[in-house]
Image (cartoon, rainbow, N blue to C red):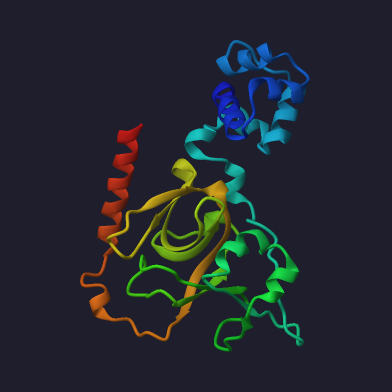
């Protein structure tokens, strides 16, 4: 049973001391210490409170290694209720999030008034069956797409729908708004690996629970045509796979 390990991890991630958690459970601090050391097990009523407090099922709390594999709830849930702007004919607009608006977007994406204040447009050739959003690139991590390129993404409702090797715009609490090639390791360790097409940038990982929105890249708009000189040697899937292996080896070494 993994209760002791999971309880200690979830308490630490939530920024709670043993005394603070004990107060929420109406217990002595020594009982929390005993739970985390595996010397005692909580009653079912206490487990129910812990389940509600940490937003995790009792089964997962008892039997799933949350620290290593992440929360199952985060991997299967709908990421959030999407705020959508529409025109006078009740057609969904494509809302444009520029470079300067990216920081504000993290705080305002659920605010209808904020979303309506951003630029909006239509592209007739895109399917009407999806919801789209446009994000302006900053930096050169995804060459040959240059800074200022606008990526149009289709909304992805669940983390498990991410397809390894595809490019996505991710809105995350840890990294902000980023456009990367994504590899899905949620089942293995509860994380996503983000890879740049520009080989000068190292891959990195984000926790599934840190993801606020996902948009699968469907099109781009640019006033600069891609220049082969911007990318002397295209990165192949084999190159990306090797970068992922190198990163995972480095993570294991640091542990």
In the image, taking residue 90 as reference, residue 192 lies left or right, namely left
Question: Which residue occupies the foreground of this view, 220 or 74?
Answer: 220
On the image, the x and y values in percent for residue 113 come to 75, 70
User: What residue occupies the far front of the structure in this picture?
Assistant: 100
Single out the residue that lies furthest toward the left: 232
Residue toward you, 130 or 16: 16
In percent of width and height, residue 132 lies at 59, 74
| Residue 68 in the image, given as x and y percentages of width and height | 47, 35
In the image, is residue 76 above or below residue 138?
above
Q: Residue at x 32, y 51 (%)?
A: 244
Q: Which image quadrant: the N terminus?
A: top right
Residue at position x 65%, y 21% in the image: 18
> Which quadrant holds residue 225?
bottom left
Q: Is 95 drawn above or below residue 197 in the view shown?
A: below
Task: Please name the residue shown 56% across and 15% down the image.
Answer: 37
> To which quarter of the image does residue 95 belong?
bottom right
Snapshot quadrant of residue 214: bottom right
Horizontally, residue 170 falls left or right of residue 52, namely left
Q: Quadrant of the C terminus?
A: top left
How far from the left and from the top, in percent, is residue 89? 76, 87
Mark count? 0
Residue at image location 65% in from the left, 37% down from the top: 56
Q: Quick check: 153 left or right of 148?
A: right
């Amino acid at each position: 049973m993994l209760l002791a390990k999971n309880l200690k991890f979830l308490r630490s991630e939530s920024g709670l001391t043993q005394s603070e958690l004990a107060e929420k459970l109406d217990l002595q601090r020594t009982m929390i210490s005993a739970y985390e050391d595996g010397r005692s097990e909580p009653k079912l009523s206490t487990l129910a409170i812990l389940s509600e407090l940490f937003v995790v099922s009792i089964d997962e709390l008892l039997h799933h290694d949350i620290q290593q594999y992440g929360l199952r709830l985060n991997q299967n849930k709908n990421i959030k209720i999407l705020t959508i702007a529409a025109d006078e004919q009740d057609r969904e607009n494509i809302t444009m999030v520029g470079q300067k608006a990216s920081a504000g977007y993290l705080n305002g994406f659920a605010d209808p008034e904020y979303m309506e204040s951003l630029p909006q447009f239509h592209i007739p050739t895109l399917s009407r069956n999806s919801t789209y959003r446009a994000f302006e690139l900053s930096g050169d991590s995804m060459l040959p797409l240059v800074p200022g390129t606008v990526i149009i993404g289709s909304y992805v409702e669940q983390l498990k729908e991410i397809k390894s090797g595809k490019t996505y715009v991710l809105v995350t609490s840890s990294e902000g708004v980023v456009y990367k090639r994504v590899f899905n390791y949620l089942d293995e360790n509860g994380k996503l690996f983000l890879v740049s097409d520009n080989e000068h940038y190292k891959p990195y990982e984000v926790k599934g629970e840190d993801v606020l929105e996902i948009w699968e890249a469907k099109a781009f708009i640019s006033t600069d045509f891609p220049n082969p000189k911007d990318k002397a040697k295209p990165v192949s899937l084999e190159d990306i796979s090797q970068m992922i292996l190198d990163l995972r080896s480095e993570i294991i070494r640091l542990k």
